[in-house]
Image (spheres, coloured by chain):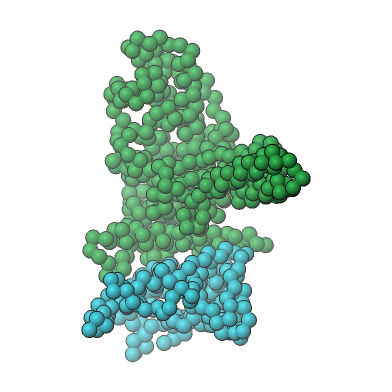
Amino acid sequence: MTVLSSEAIRERLNATDLSQRLIVSPLLDEASQAKAGQAAIDVRLGFDFALVSPSQHGSIDEFANDEAPLSLSSLYRREFVPFGRNIVIHPHQFLLAQTLEYLRLPTDLMAYVVGRSTWGRLGLIVATAVGIHPGFAGSLTLELRNLGETPLTLYPGQTVAQLFFHRVENSKGEPSAEAAALAQYTGTVDMVPRRLSDPETSRKLRKLIDG
Amino acid sequence: MWLDLMSGLIDTGKGYLAKAADPALPTADASLLVTDSEMIGNHAYDLLQKMDGSDAGHIPHQIVGPFQRWVNGLGISNTIFFRADHVANYELARFDLRSLVQNVNDASQSLIDAANAVEWPFLRVTVPSQAMGMLPHFAIVGHELGHAIQNEIKVDLTKIDSSDFANNLVTRLSDEKISLSANHTIMSQKILASWVNEMKSDAVGCLLAGPAFMFALSAFFELSGGAYGIGPSHPPSEMRRRLVLDRLTQGTPSHADVFKQQTGATLTADINSPHLKSLPPPDALYAELRTRHGPETAAICVALMPFAERVAPLIFDEAEKVLRAVKPNVIYDAVHLQEDLSDHLEPLLHLIPPIEHRQAGNVKATSLAGILNVGWAGLLTQLDKIPAPAGITPGSELTVKMEKLHELLLKAVELSEARMVWEEQV
């Protein structure tokens, strides 16, 4: 898998062919977010956050309710934080955030999201689910956790993570025809997951649990 | 600021209670202060109720900043807020609490400061909650903002021949054995003034949002039920829709030309409201209106229609003059439509929201009007091409696609506004 340089990233951002175009939008300061000579794009913290209140739930149990699977959206409290305001993440607190940028990958690219080292040194872990598949379209969800001992004040617009892009190739080093054919554009702008298991897995597990 | 006014009232009430607690005060005076405090508290509660629906849980927070740009673009300096409510109609309400504040004894400093910080009258725009399902419907807010500047759009109606109006009215009234009187003249003037204000606001909405306004307006008419829309406060819906379309077909290229070129669809009056009831012939319309409004109002409304048609072009011209004089950039012309549809319509089908224009390395944010127009063009002409996620329930594909479109447009509104705000920080 070839890693795209900043130059290649910029070419993809400006591609006229929609099947080739990479969307990371808006890049509020393109020169500093896609620095020449590097191989990544810096992405910023967006405006929407979601928090799980630990005191409200004994344990998050997908099958606790006999009637219906757990609705994950009910676990979260959403917060909108505009430019100029902030949200504090306390030591060992976990919250979901979104990138400010909307991302859409062409079918021949995948990406990794990685926390910026500056934040990492302060104890902030930015993402645990780091791989982004070809054809992804939507806002990226960041799973933030403060592993440090000091509260951190976060402002929408701060550069918080980096995206590294890779070409998806077959075993001969050519663009993957399978990825191009099967990648599904699934625009998603909601960071809160809907369910833990797919319906079939959920059905079978339920049968096992019920004995 | 609305909450500041409430807080100021509560502080004033608390001041009364503090005074009432003085043991040296005669009981009757203390009782009066407690009663006054209760009244002030009721006022504060009343204000709280008036802002119901203005929180982020009711109205999409993303839309408020772009609306405020329209407000600023129109030169409206009044303090304003937006809310969504379970009501049938869009509405612009005006509140002026200056006399209340001036007449309150021993007003708290926080109340005085809050009142001084407001540009009165305080405006409140209400959007019906049903519009929340699809972002493009918000284009009608342009009409409500038009009401805020309607008095600045001055039209000399004396230039228009009104003889047919007078003749038609006299004939209808005489059929009812009613003689024309001064009272009918006053009634006619009031109804005409209301109709003219509606047409002024339609003109402003059309100038702000172009075809998106017509689509939203006509959809609203159709969703409003089976009536013709005509009455003492509003001209007929079918006529309003046609007058807006007439304006959108003017110019070279016109909005209609651009829409046809970019979408392949002809911009017709009924493109988004095929089931809007057509007006019946005047006699049948009169008979129907008569049962609802009485013979005199019905006669005036029916007689006014041809006159209103002749007045409309003057109103649209004058509205454009006013807007061009204030801030010409706020006008959404055919060139803007061309740029937005050519840059964003095809990408929208690939789930790329119309956030910004990117040309030769230069980037600029898409306007709210641009997003609304791209949204309507996608909704009306390309919805079948929007990809639906795998595994959706059979039969729900259309609904899922509409929800997806709404999400993408809302994201575009949020992020284009973010770019604008960022670039303003110099």
- Please give left or right for residue B315 compared with residue B227 in the image: right
Give me the residue at 33% from left, 49% from top.
B265
Task: Specify whether residue B62 is in view.
Answer: yes
Residue lying furthest bottom: A171
User: Up-down: is B401 above or below A126?
Assistant: above
Q: Quadrant of the C terminus of chain B?
A: bottom right
- Please give left or right for residue B183 compared with residue A36 in the image: left
Tint of chain A? cyan
Give me the residue at 43% from left, 71% from top.
A75
Q: Which one is in front, B168 or B79?
A: B79
Task: Specify whether residue B367 is in view.
Answer: no
Q: Which one is in front, B180 or B342?
A: B180
Q: Which one is in front, B126 or B375?
A: B126
Percent across and percent down for residue B198 are 47, 34
Percent across and percent down for residue B7 are 64, 51
Q: Which chain is green?
A: B
User: Up-down: is B242 above or below B113?
Assistant: above
- Please give left or right for residue A57 compared with residue A45 in the image: left
Percent across and percent down for residue B18 are 71, 49
Residue B387, quarter of the rendered image: bottom left
* Number of on-image labels: 0
User: Up-down: is B403 above or below A92?
Assistant: above
Give me the residue at 54% from left, 74% from top.
A43
Percent across and percent down for residue B41 are 60, 46
Give me the residue at 48% from left, 29% from top.
B194
- Please give left or right for residue B142 compared with residue B284 in the image: right
